[in-house]
Structures are given as structure tokens and as C-alpha cells.
Amino acid sequence: MSRINKNVVLALLTLTSSAFLLFQLYYYKHYLSTKNGAGLSKSKGSRIGFDSTQWRAVKKFIMLTSNQNVPVFLIDPLILELINKNFEQVKNTSQGSISQCTFFCVPRDFTAFALQYHLWKNEEGWFRIAENMGFQCLKIESKDPRLDGIDSLSGTEIPLHYICKLATHAIHLVVFHERSGNYLWHGHLRLKEHIDRKFVPFRKLQFGRYPGAFDRPELQQVTVDGLEVLIPKDPMHFVEEVPHSRFIECRYKEARAFFQQYLDDNTVEAMAFRKSAKELLQLAAKTLNKLGVPFWLSSGTCLGWYRQCNIIPYSKDVDLGIFIQDYKSDIILAFQDAGLPLKHKFGKVEDSLELSFQGKDDVKLDIFFFYEETDHMWNGGTQAKTGKKFKYLFPKFTLCWTEFVDMKVHVPCETLEYIEANYGKKQQGA
């Protein structure tokens, strides 16, 4: 009996030991190894993600631009959004203190940077150096649209885009040119016939589908994934500009042809009016921008931009359009505070609102509010003398940036259709 008990006890001890051993193995595999692994990954000398193609391409590009004094800053919307969401982390990070690649290792085909062309002092040679570093580079050039109205310079080409590929990742360097309205402009990326369409997935580029205009950003240097880069001080303002950045040029060649057929009015009176109208437009833009109210050139002012790239000297006023949903109740007070007293107010916010302010030298500012329907837009008009009301219909339109009298302002992208709805089909050419 005592012998049987002894065997049972031995069996129980063996079973207990085996169970404990299995528990130790399970505990080590599922808890301690994970814990120790996490500790190792965060310890100094172990870095996660820094072997990615994206990070290595960005690192080499930053080395290149830094060594060659190429004035670039990061404009990639995806990366800027991530930086903005984690800005405290980025701001408090020093170079070399990062253990995990968070931003530049995000899967994507391109990383976009902007080149400040007006600050670039050493253009020659960097292209060759980039290729010596392992990049395959493509340069996109085109005629400078600002010179279209000058015969002797209209064929001058300027760089618009560079695309430098390292392995499977490409850097899209968007060339930003300084414009007279104190803003930055980039051109359309048009592929010439000899360019290999398979060089990179061009359709995925976020810049270059059309020319773009941006406010000149204030820049700051930060450390992102261990790399020192310049970014806009307000990243989200830049990101929000991107989908609304489309730019259209004034039609310089057509304007020159117009003045060959119809002589420009260069009388003292005409020059004085244009000066006063420009100052009034600048003051109106400053007032509306301060209110956060978007606007565009409308009526005769829009016609002048489209037809002759200038203010029509006999128009006697400045015309702006505003969507009624952007109306603000303090708009009249804001203009009065700016020194522009209200001259007329027609209609009401819910129907045919129109405001008119008196500028200096008898130049008037007219603001037309536009209402959107299912398939068209409209604005109301009222005759000052008779009080008779009119309703003007417009096809739906979107807004583009342009340059007018040294200012960055909006016009309807579908300008011709807009003008024809306003004046008929003959006025845009005569």
C-alpha cells in the first residue's frame, strides 16, 4: 500500500513539474520575449524603418540640397498633415534622438519639395552631382508665361519641375517662381514627346496637373525622422491651399493684339483712373482678406483682365463678386472703417444683395453677391434711379488664381462663359 502511494506521488510530481515547465515556456514566449523585444527596439542603437526606400531617398536628397545650397522646403501634403498632427513630438525632437521612422517611411511613390528659384545661386552642376549620387533625374522646362507679351523674350524657357528617382522612390522638386504680387507660382508639368512615360507614375503627382499659386510661406526648420528640413510655419494653411491653387494667366498675346486694333487710352485722366482703381482694389482685397471673405473679379473688372490684362479706363468702378454663403454681417462696417462709406445697398441677404461703396476720386466699388441653384448661379441687379430689379444668370463656375495689376486675385476659371453670360459674345473681343 505504501509502495503504491509512493508511485502515485512520483507521478503527480512529474506531472506538476511538466506543467510548470510548459507554463514557463509559454510565459517567456508570449510575455517576456515581447517585453524585452520592445525594450530593445527603443534602446539606443536600434532604429525601426530607417532602411526603407522612401527614407533613404529623402535622406540623400536632403544631403544633396544641403551640400549644394539648394533652397528647398517640404511641401508634401501627406507628410505635412502627419507633422501637423504630431507637431509637439516633432518640435521636441532633436537630430539623432529618433528610434522609429514615422513620417518619411509612410508608403508612397513621391515626396514633394519646393525649390525657391529666386534664391537659387548655383543652378549649374547639381543635376550631375545628383546623378553621381545614384539619382536618375528628369528636368521639365517650358516658356516663361510672364514674358508672353514681350516679343524678344517670349521664347525664354525656365525650369518648372525636377523629378529625381532613387530605386523605387522619387523626389518631386516643384520649382516655385516669385511673382510681382508677392506670391509663389509653379508651372504646369507637360511631358514632351521624348520623355519616357514610364519613368515614374506621373498621374500620381500632386503638383503640376495645372499651374498653381501660393501665399509666400514663412518657413521653420524642424527635425523629421532624424533629418533636418524646412517646412511652412503653418503646415495646414499650405495643405489647405493645394486643392484651391489652380492658376490661369492673363492672355498677354491677345491683349497685345487687342491694343493693336484698339489703341490704349493713355490720357492723363485714364492713367489717373487706373491708379485710383488699383488702389481701391488693393484696399478692398485687404479688407475682405482680413474678414476671411473670398472674392473674385467680376463684371467690367473681369472683362478688363480677360480682354486687355488691365483696368478698362472708361469703366469708372471696380467690380467684385462674392458667394452669398461667404457674406458676413460686419462687412459694411469693415469697409467703412477702411475709409469707404456705403453709397448704396440693394436687395437683402436672402435675395439679390448688392453693395456699393464710395472710393476716392469718384471711383466706386461694387460688390455683387451670387446665389447658387441646382444647375446655375445668379446675382441680382437694381437700377439706382428707378429701383427696377434684374436677375442675371450664369453657368456654374469655379475660381482660379490669376495676377492682375500686380495682385494675386481670383477670377472665374471658366472666364469666357462668365463674361458671355454678363455681356454677350461680342464684348470679350471688342
Image (cartoon, rainbow, N blue to C red):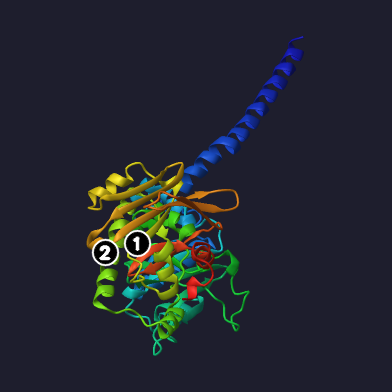
Q: Is residue 203 left or right of residue 262?
A: right
Identify the residue at image location x=41%, y=85%.
260
User: Residue 284 shows which numbered tag?
Assistant: none
Q: Look at label 1 and name its amino acid.
A: Val
Q: Is residue 14 left or right of residue 88?
A: right
Other-residue count near label 2 (Cα within 10 Å), few / some / many at <14 / 14–19 / ≥20: some
Q: Nearer the viewer, residue 49 or 69?
A: 69
- Asked whether residue 96 is in view, the answer is no
Give residue 206's position: percent from left, percent from top: 52, 63
Q: Is residue 318 left or right of residue 79?
A: left
Identify the residue at image location x=51%, y=77%.
137
Q: Is residue 176 left or right of residue 41?
A: left
Q: Look at label 2 and name its amino acid.
A: Glu
Residue that numbered label 1 is attached to? 318
Identify the residue at image location x=57%, y=81%.
192
Q: Report helix, strand or loop for mark 2.
A: helix
Looking at the image, tell me whether mark 2 or mark 1 is earlier in sequence order.
Answer: 2
Q: Report helix, strand or loop for mark 1.
A: strand
Give residue 413's position: percent from left, percent from top: 50, 64
In the figure, residue 268 lies in which quadrant?
bottom left
Residue that numbered label 2 is attached to? 279
Question: Compared to 158, does 80 lie above or below?
Answer: above
In the figure, residue 213 lies in which quadrant?
bottom left
Quadrant in which the N terminus is drawn: top right
Other-residue count near label 1 (Cα within 10 Å), few / some / many at <14 / 14–19 / ≥20: many
Q: Nearer the viewer, residue 209 or 344?
A: 344
Q: Nearer the viewer, residue 77 or 244?
A: 244
- Asked whether residue 286 is in view, the answer is yes
Q: How many marks?
A: 2
Give residue 6's position: percent from left, percent from top: 72, 16
Q: Nearer the viewer, residue 172 or 429?
A: 429
